[in-house]
Image (spheres, helix red, strand yellow):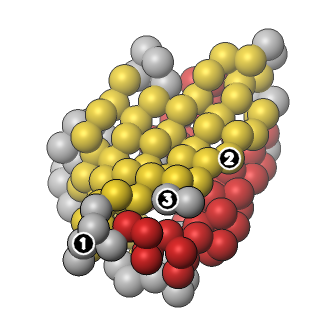
Amino acid sequence: MTNFSTTVDIQAPRERVWDVLLDVARWPEWTPTTSRVERLDAGPFTVGSRARIFQPKLRPAVWQVTELNQAAGSFTWVTRSAGVLVTARHRVEENGGGCRVTLSLDFSGVLAWLAARTAGGMMERYIAAEANGLRARSEA
């Protein structure tokens, strides 16, 4: 498997969850899977924005936003390493009085199978922890 995904329902307005999600510099405050984030550009978080993310058990990675759709509540960003492209998608959708968030990671490239096989279990745990942290932060 080279793709990993999780979905969580959050009892908070979509706008609140979206704001928490887009404030990537503050992710270390609510998810244990991120120890530090360095924004590499000034200004609003938009297509082309980059951030260096430090995560336990992983090498620091520079992520660049490739798609951001405020109206749809989604953004996608990518990072590259030797032989692997990792694409992370984030989607926040209305769901009754709250919202539903889907987080996913896709590995592609010649070494994607190896990266996914080596780190797959950890990736599943990380995106589940991120979804739960986002829920706790947004519902607080």
| Crowding at mark 3 (Cα within 10 Å: few <14, some 14-19, many 20+) | some
Q: Earlier in the sequence, mark 1 or mark 3?
A: 3
Residue 85 x %, y % = 30, 61
For image coordinates 49% across by 70% down, the residue present is 116
**Amino acid on which disc 2 is placed:** Thr
Mark 1 residue element: loop
Relative to residue 97, is residue 108 depicted above or below? below
The residue at 65%/63% (across/down) is 124
Judge the density around disc 1: few (<14), some (14-19), many (≥20) Cα neighbours within 10 Å.
Answer: few
The amino acid type of the residue labelled 1 equals Gly
Disc 2/disc 1 C-alpha distance (Å): 25 Å
Q: Earlier in the sequence, mark 2 or mark 1?
A: 2
Observer-side mark, 2 or 1, equals 1
Could you say which disc has been placed on residue 45 in the image?
none
Q: Is residue 32 left or right of residue 1?
A: right
Q: Is residue 40 left or right of residue 25?
A: left
Residue at 45%, 53% in the rendered image:
106
**Image spot of residue 77 (x, y percent):** 33, 48
**Does residue 36 appear anywhere in the picture?**
no
Find residue 59 and report its image quarter.
Answer: bottom left
Q: Which residue is mark 1?
A: 83
Query: Where in the figure is residue 6, as x and y percent of width and height?
Result: 68, 47
Label 2 packing within 10 angstroms: few (<14), some (14-19), many (20+): some
Task: Determine whether the residue tagged by mark 2 lies in a helix, strand or loop.
Answer: strand
Residue designated by label 3: 2
* Residue 8 visible at all: yes
**In this figure, which residue is indicated by the disc labeled 2?**
6
Q: Amino acid at mark 3?
A: Thr
